[in-house]
């Protein structure tokens, strides 16, 4: 029989190895150090030494030693319950971490500029959701500068931004293009045209949202129309882009949207493409971000971008207008 152990002071945490807990559980289940050692591929003496070390660390005897085997002490019975729970918890934790490493779980935080109602982003999000059902997607609306600042701080995983500008400390890859559409009232004379030119739009009043991407659209209009010798009249409305388009239907002014946003239909509003006007869109992310779900997400985005059906809808880079400042 082992002598009773001296109880350790309450402020001394035992240094217990997980393997010793496994040996203890095996010995308790087999009722014998010899049988536990046989099951684990160890000698009886090796199991006995490790159990003794565990008892020394805890400060209590866990087994009564008999000639025929071992039986649990009162302390050992209580410890067995917690030991099994600890092994189960660690095993589950290891499984969850492995799942996250395989991107089966986790989260991808995405900054958006274009619409997710249709087009490339809608297809990407749909297909990723089908492949990785347990990965949570978080969407954040905002302007490119704010998105990139969050990416640099790893507070955001990836942003999809109009343009091909390179950002400090970030990776970037152009993935798709979208045509640019003018938004005008259905009753407007220009709505009779299938396509419009900048010359058609030069003398009209435009409205943009105070929220993103209002500033980018404002700067885009200025660059496009001043090239024609026109100084555009642009009014800023203190509404989000979802309320901006209905204002167009009320003849407050015209505005611009990218192709994916034309999926949203509003009464009294017409969308008309601007001839030869195409926006490139890029994914921007931080190369220090080790989120495995992000890597899978980017891999799928690049795969979709390279598909022949996607490329047929794109315009050659030389024909695109880069809105980046």
Image: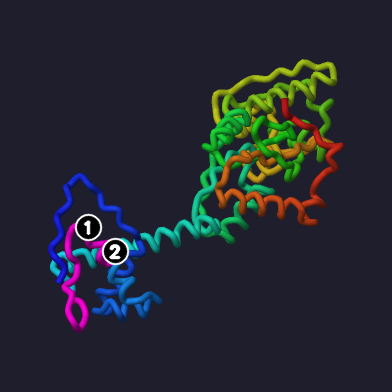
Q: Is residue 230 above or below residue 95?
A: above
The residue at 58%/42% (across/down) is 289
Q: Residue at x 27, y 62 (%)?
A: 53
| Residue located at (39% from left, 62% from top) | 92
Question: Quick check: can you spot residue 243?
Answer: no
Q: Which of the 4 image quarters holds residue 232?
A: top right
Helix, strand or loop status at disc 2 = helix
Q: What residue did someone put label 1 on? A: 58
Magenta highlight on residue 156: no
Left/right placement of residue 115 relative to residue 166 reads left
Res 85 label: 2
Q: Considering the image in quadrants, where does the N terminus appear? A: bottom left
Which residue reaches farthest bottom? 68
The front one of 146 and 218 is 146
Q: From which residue to which does the magenta span run? A: 50-71
Colour scheme employed for the rendering of this structure: rainbow
């Amino acid at each position: 029989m082992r002598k009773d152990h001296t109880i350790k002071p309450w402020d001394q945490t035992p240094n217990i190895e997980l393997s010793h807990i496994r040996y203890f559980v095996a010995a308790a289940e087999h009722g014998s150090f010899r049988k536990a050692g046989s099951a684990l591929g160890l000698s009886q003496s090796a199991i006995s030494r490790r159990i003794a070390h565990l008892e020394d660390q805890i400060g209590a005897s866990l087994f009564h030693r008999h000639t025929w085997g071992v039986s649990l002490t009162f302390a050992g019975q209580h410890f067995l319950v917690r030991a099994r729970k600890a092994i189960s918890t660690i095993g589950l934790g290891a499984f969850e971490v492995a799942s996250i490493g395989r991107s089966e779980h986790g989260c991808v935080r995405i900054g958006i500029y274009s619409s997710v109602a249709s087009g490339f982003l809608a297809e990407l999000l749909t297909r990723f959701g089908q492949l990785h059902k347990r990965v949570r997607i978080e969407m954040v609306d905002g302007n490119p500068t704010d998105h990139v600042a969050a990416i640099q701080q790893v507070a955001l995983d990836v942003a999809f931004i109009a343009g091909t500008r390179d950002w400090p400390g970030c990776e970037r890859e152009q993935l798709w293009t979208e045509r640019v559409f003018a938004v005008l009232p259905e009753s407007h004379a220009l709505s009779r045209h299938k396509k419009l030119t900048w010359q058609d739009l030069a003398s009209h009043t435009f409205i943009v949202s105070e929220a993103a991407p209002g500033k980018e659209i404002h700067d885009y209009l200025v660059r496009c129309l001043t090239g024609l010798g026109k100084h555009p009249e642009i009014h800023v409305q203190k509404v989000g882009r979802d309320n901006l388009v209905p204002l167009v239907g009320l003849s407050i002014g015209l505005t611009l949207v990218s192709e994916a946003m034309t999926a949203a239909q509003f009464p009294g509003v017409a969308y008309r493409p601007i001839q030869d006007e195409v926006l490139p869109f890029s994914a921007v992310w931080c190369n220090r971000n080790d989120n495995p779900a992000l890597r899978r997400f980017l891999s799928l985005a690049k795969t979709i971008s390279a598909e022949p059906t996607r490329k047929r809808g794109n315009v050659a880079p030389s024909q695109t207008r880069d809105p980046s400042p």
